[in-house]
Amino acid sequence: MTMIPYSTQCIEQEDIQAVSEALKKEYLTGGPAVNEFEEAAASYLGVKYAVAVSSGTAALHAACAVIGIHEGDEVITSPNTWVSSANAVLYCGGKPVFADIDTETYNINPDEIEKKITARTKAILPVHYAGEPCDMERIHKIAKANHLVVIEDAAHAIGAIYKGNKIGSLSDMTIFSFHPVKQMTTCEGGMVTTNNEELYEKLKLFRAYGMIKKAEKVIEEGPWFSEQISLGYNYRLSDVQCALGISQIKKIDKLLDRRREIAGVYDRELQGYGIVLPKRSLDSVSACHLYPIQVKADKRKELYMKFREAGIGVGVHYYPVYKNAYYKEIGYDSIYCKVSEDFYARELSLPIHYKITDNDLDYILEVSKGFLQQY
């Protein structure tokens, strides 16, 4: 039996053609496709600058690094996320501080953010879980009042809209992921967006070894000369991957529309089956990366296994970050975020992606209703 995954890439003939053409060109990396992809993304998101990098994790690391996170600095983030959101703070020597989530949106709760602010807090890193935008108006007010930087983790949220503006254009920086399970893909890849030119220049340095060509040094040494002026990494995205990204972003709205259509069907058809369905905000539009439902905690594992035995690749998102063994080893063993832990114990993610056919959707609903009626 073929498994219907909870999410997967959509690669079509035009994508294959774009990659094929890129492989025939002079530059496989470090060439013009990178700028073209960045310009296309910035235009789509309504932001001044975009910097393509090798992964969403690299994007998070870059964003934390260029604002100067270092030992002693605290960054408030959500425990309901993949580990990269917090790991990026650790990479810079800082300390992730976990604020519990809202019971309805599953996003970081602004009230909990306020409780966690100390003299050492330097930034807030909200995560748009499942593609549903966080309460950015509240978060920006908190940040402004406390002189904090805001880095949005929009790994789930390309194309999401908050109060009429696309996520990616609202804060000091926003990061995206283009992993194959996301709404669009570059195989692996990520991006940082910003309206701040100084941050933009720092991000470009950080992703490419901290190397730069200075005109006066080139005249002195020769046209080959470049010089490292800061500590950077090789976080570049290849031209081949950027060619795929350019092709994908041209059809991102089509890919998002299908996800939103499937979410709407689930919203209608799964009412009244004793589960908690996602809430929809009136002032935002979700990018529908995940479709999280909540079932009875003591039945979750059994339901997970039954769904997968039926060929429906449900997922579970997420084990609270601070509960991972590594985080316990470094001092997070006493952390407890009640809402996040309760949510994790009950959450199942139903399949939602462009390649789900109407027949697939009918089958998922039939199986879901049958299983849920038993519980």
Image (tube, rainbow, N blue to C red):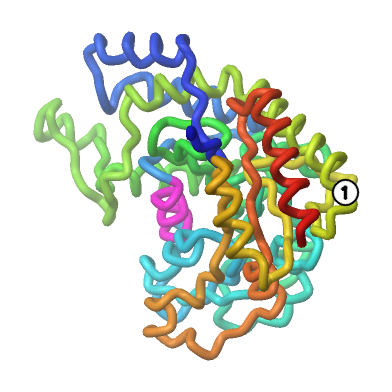
Residue 53, x across and y down, in percent:
39, 40
Kindly tell me whether residue 159 is visible in this rendering: yes
Q: Out of 34 and 273, give the one closest to the viewer.
A: 273
Kindly tell me whether residue 147 is visible in this rendering: no
- Check the image and report above or below for 233 versus 295: above
Q: Secondary structure at mark 1?
A: loop
- Check the image and report above or below for 49 versus 306: above
- Disc 1: which residue: 271
The stretch of residues the image draws in magenta is 56-65
Whether residue 59 appears in magenta in the rendering, the answer is: yes
Write the residue at 33% across / 9% down: 21
Q: Out of 365 and 78, give the one closest to the viewer.
A: 365
Instruction: Provide the major secondary structure of the magenta segment.
Output: helix
Q: Is residue 279 left or right of residue 219?
A: right
Residue 20, x across and y down, in percent:
32, 11
How crowded pointer 1 is (Cα within 10 Å; few <14, some 14-19, many 20+) is rated as few
